Image (spheres, coloured by chain):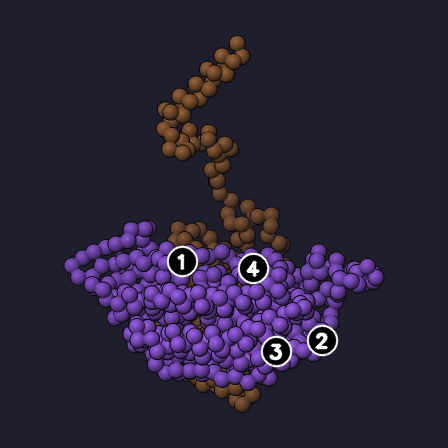
Amino acid sequence: MPSTQSPPIAGAAIDPPSLRPAIDDAVIERVDVLGVRARLEALKNEGFTMLLDLGAVDYPQRAPRFDVVYHLLKMPDAVASVAAVGTPARVRVLCGVDAADPHLPSVVDLWRSADWAEREVWDLFGIVFDGHPDLRRIQMPQEWEGHPLRKDYPLRGPERDRSPRPSFALKSNVQAGTPPSGRTLEALQEQIKRAAARDGAAHE
Amino acid sequence: MSSLSATPLTPEIVTQDGNSMVLSMGPQHPSTHGVLQVMLEIEGETVVKAEPEIGYLHTGIEKSAENLFWSQAQTVIERMDYLAPESNALCYALAVEKLLGVTDAIPKRAQAIRVLFAELTRIASHCVWLGTGGIDLGALSVFFYTFDLRENILDLQEAAGGARMHPNYVRIGGLNGDLPDGFLAKLDALIEKFPGRMRDLRGLLQANPILQDRMIDVGVLSLDEALQWNCTGPTLRACGVAYDVRRAFPYSSYEEYEFDIPTRTEGDAYARFLVRLDEMEESHRIIKQVRAKLDTPGPVLVDDPKIAAPPKETIALSMEALIHHFKIVSEGFRVPPGDVYHAVEGPRGELGFYIVSDGGNRPYRVRTRPPSMYNLQALKSIAPGNLIADLVVSIGSLDPVFGEVDR
């Protein structure tokens, strides 16, 4: 059941990246799952030696549902100033991934840095990177169910049974058999009995 | 090693056979600078394989940000890299300003003060790294020298933004108000004090034979490995690459300031140590140049009532101002749809935000490029062949911040 804090999914979010392509200094490319690895490898050979980042975005009302976003940096150009080089040194590669078959080839063998980034995308979006040597959850606990950064995942997590809080500390301690301040359960019961007897005597 | 793949529960010694042993270091180990667990396969004292385990501080900041207004999201984003909050805030604000299309409308004074805080926060962050790194090596007194300097910077943050650790002073569209009275005098005192304090620190540490013994040729990262692991910031510059976002993709008028990019070629812990010390002095240089600009008053917030609320004094006088206030407080502002990647040079390296807007009053997606996470990953290359004691130095020299690694 979705948490009440989740805002409604906005209807406009079909494909924001296509609307205004040239806000920042990166060149933007869109590829499909079949061509993504070849394109990334070609870019790497062109001098984009660093895979700066790898992330994902979820567009539930669109097919393909996910965008996996690769940010590449051309190293020798980036060291010199942009004005001196004059060519953009950043490339952003967007790859649509279908929700029914969320599989994508891994690029860990091209850039080792993709290791944790791909694990994070798997963990938080449920997108599988084929060929990743060790694809397991990285941020959430291993036994966690669901992928929290998907838009249909409730903000406060799934509904789950929470054991009721003890209403009264002393009572809960007595029930659990661990009385406070080092007194044993027997001593505590004895004290309660004595107090009751004293109160009874006072009232008579 | 299959035994490394599954995260064990808690026992210190996980497996043991004839020669090697798998040991869990952390997540509560004092020298891991936060909650890092490193699964170590060791032979005697030598590390054969190290597998860092992260995620112990995962707080879902990116998810939270999607559920807050554009301006509110900045509050949680500042808490990612808690040692350099203003770097996070600046990067996020710059990215959103690009989406809004107001980048060129940010007043010059606001840009200068943003640079001032970005550099102050870099010094403060390096102070924590140096102080805690000194403790890792047994140099306890360094901590007091560096934290005293950091305290002065936190005082400045408190004066400007009202809070020491998370001032939330940089805002989308400019700043949360101009510098308060007396700020510049405090800043001048700090500028005055800094060179002497750096001389002390260098005197204590740089030529110290014990420190050199512990750091030289320890935690060596080759240039090729650094690029493979996508390291940025001082970690990459200690391998000989002068990549600095401030120079490569200038933002907030960094092109107006004169500064050098310190590099070393050794790639060891000592090289990273020297690069960071030099960086602190370069930051001091930039701060002095910013200070010279601060005497001329000017606006510090973009002149657009749809993004930045008009001054509070106008509320009682102008119906329009009241309406703008009400709109911004009750439903935030809307950002035109699109996606943007913006990066700044944080104390740990290239800090980037990939932000998607769907035209609403909340960010659709905020993806962080956390420099600490990528730098920390390089530990897999650094650790093998080193002693366990040197691993402590290696982790310290990468300077990870776990609020940012785990988010």
Q: Residue A13 falls in which quadrant of the image? A: bottom right
Distance in Å between CA atoms under marks 3 and 1: 38 Å
Asked whether the residues under the numbered discs 3 and 2 touch, taking CB atoms below 8 Å apart as contact, a structural biologist would say: no
Q: Circle 3 sits on which residue? A: B291
Mark 3 / mark 2, whichever is N-terminal: 3
| Residue at image coords 71%, 60% | B328
The residue under label 3 is which amino acid type? Arg
- On the same chain: label 1 and label 2? yes
Q: Which residue is mark 2?
A: B298
Q: Nearer the viewer, mark 1 or mark 2?
A: 2
The type of residue carrying mark 1 is Val
User: Is residue A111 found left or right of B284 in the rendered image?
Assistant: left
Residue at the location (42% across, 65% down)? Answer: B143
Q: Nearer the viewer, mark 4 or mark 3?
A: 3
What residue type is disc 4 on? Val
- Say left or right for B73 vs B348: right
Mark 4 Cα-neighbour bin, 10 Å: few <14, some 14–19, many ≥20: many
- Apparent colour of chain B: purple
